Amino acid sequence: MDLLNRLASLDPDIKLKALREVKNQIIGNRTKKLAFLKLGAIPAVASLLAAAIAEADSQLKNGEVTIADKNSNYYNNNTFIQSAAVLGSFACGFDDGVRAVLDAGALPYLIQLLSNPDEKVVDAGARSLRMIYQSKLTPKYEILQDKKMEFLLSLLNSESENVTGLGASIITHSCETSLEQKSLSDAGVLKKLLGLLEGSFSQRDASLESLAALFRNNPEVVSKFVGQESGSALSSIIGLTKDRYPRTRLLACMCLIVIRNSSPFYLQDVGIKTKLLYLSLELLDDPGEVGDEAPFVFSSLIMEKEDLQKLAFEANALEKFSNHLQNSRLHPKRLQGILLALADICSKLESCRYRFLSLEVWNMVTNALTHDSAGVRTAACICIRSVTRSIKNLCAGYFMNEVLVIPLVQLLNDSLVSVQVAALGAISNILVDFTTGKSTFVQCGALKQLIQLSKSMESTVRLNALWALKNMVFLADDRCKEGIFMELTASLLASLICDHNPFVQEQALALVRNLIDGCISSVEYVFTENGIILDAVRKQLESTSKAEIGIQGMYVLGNVASGNEFHKEAVMQQLLPQVDNENQSFIIKFLQSNDSRLRTAAVWAIVNLTFPSSPGAFRRLIKLRSLGIVPEIRNMVNDPCLDVKVLHLSNVDCGFPFYLS
């Protein structure tokens, strides 16, 4: 508290000494930062900076500079430098500090320092701003505004290393859209960043990060850069993968991966892929921040790429990451990255999942579900989801145990939506389990939690909760289905089928499809509460333009049509136009669809309605003929989709030729 009192002193010497002392105490000390933050140090420092700027501006307006002014100028400049250093230190790697700096309104004052005639003041302001712009909490810099673009270009043109680095950092922080990428490229930023690659290690690193932001998912900008300096620009980045600084090697690797992922024309040969893979694995051994970030760079290389996942498998990446996973002192960020890397390696290849499970680190993954870091909890769920794609192990009931299930279900109550969604993804996979072990989830309270989450205001939570419920009823026994339906209720299912989000609609229909599949008695669920579910299905099928909704809806009707005569007649009522004879039935549109999956689903419903052993099959066929369905079925003899052809033959076997003749 004494320090804060000294910051408010009228004696400039006392204030400066207090600023220096605060700076020295908080550098690299999170505990001290938090303590000073609670005492209100940041608003006090921001006020000092604002007052010094106001005094300097006042002197400038007066024109004449007295001895007193010169003395005051000395204190002002030192106040600028020390205040900027304190604010930057608070912001460095400390989100609470960044938030407090922003709330104190210090950002505009720090930007003003960049136009100060004293180089030391400019450098101090630039260093502080670079730390602030490393945080996701900092507002995006509106690059596309003319004055702001000019200011950004002036930063990149500066002779000061810290100022050019700030310009590059702002690009990294704020360049998100293809329009922003193109505007910066057209303004000549690529050439300036290329020039920084030949500067100090700090400038090289800042430039590499900015280039990656400009290249991401933008082949046009990538192509323009590769053509810079007669094609040597790309070679410059490749050369930096051999730099003596590990962070520069990591950023060069990251930049090349972004180029490779963004454009199909560059860096696609197996040699460069292998080089990037081994480099990212090598950097994992770095004990500092580079090692913490290396798994994320590795993941960006192999994500969704089966050929690279196979290369990683052959390079013993699973063993390397698993060995690191056994280190109990891992930094949370590194642990998160390793779990995500393992998830990516195991995402497509069964051989990778089998090898991973044999390494006996599964308990460490499940332990991470209760980690203090939300990022680690999320990554653990994603890893479990990836590994549980193994049909073989699901069939064996390998994952259906309380050690795994209980912490996953507990995460459904997590305060963060991202953790809830990740947990739902893992639970969805495990619930595909083909054994009778689904009762484990019910006993742990998962059913009530899933139903509660299906009512969430967050559409991603509703969607994933429905996905899990859909898998829970998949091949479930009648008793399990009855218990689930009693908890869900027909009215909730109907409201979810009519949800404003089409993806939620699709999963709600898929849930009903699985619920009524199998035993005829389960078909009765769609007739409860005066058939509210069936009405909702028809409403969506009449209005949807999304094929996936049509597919799931038609399979619902097809499953109902597999029941008794009452069930089949109810489906016929859904297919008939609801207003007048001029309205075409939605099933005609589906039979004519370009999507073979939708055509297949529609034909299945017709097959179940007209099966010869059904007493009312002929009567229903006459009605279907009046709807214009018969010519559509006849045309399917030449359908390019094998599934549709097979179903057409089923109709032939069931007597359609007699009825069609």
Image: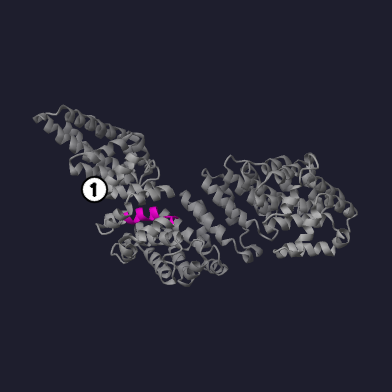
Residue at position x 27%, y 46% from top? 155
Q: Is residue 211 magenta?
A: yes
Q: Is residue 1 magenta?
A: no
Q: Is residue 287 above or below residue 106?
A: below
Question: Which residue is more in the foreground, 398 or 197?
Answer: 197
Above or below, 461 against 381 in this view is above
Quadrant of the rendered image containing residue 64: top left
Residue situated furthest left in the rendering: 67
Color scheme of the displayed model: one colour
Nearest to the observer: residue 240 or residue 39: 240
| 124 lies left or right of 330 | left
In this view of the protein, can residue 514 be seen by the observer? Answer: no
Q: Position of residue 88 (x, y in %)?
A: 29, 43
Give SS at disc 1: loop
Q: Is residue 98 above or below residue 182?
A: above
Residue 447, image x, y percentages:
66, 47
Give the residue drawn at x 17%, y 32%.
12
Q: Which residues are magenta?
A: 207-218
Indicate the amino acid at tag 1.
Answer: Ser
| Residue 246 picture location, percent across and down | 32, 62
Q: Residue at x 48, y 51 (%)?
A: 371
* Mark 1 nearby-residue class (10 Å; few <14, some 14–19, many ≥20): few
* Magenta residues, dominant SS class: helix
Residue 383 visible, this orientation: yes
Quadrant in which the N terminus appears? top left
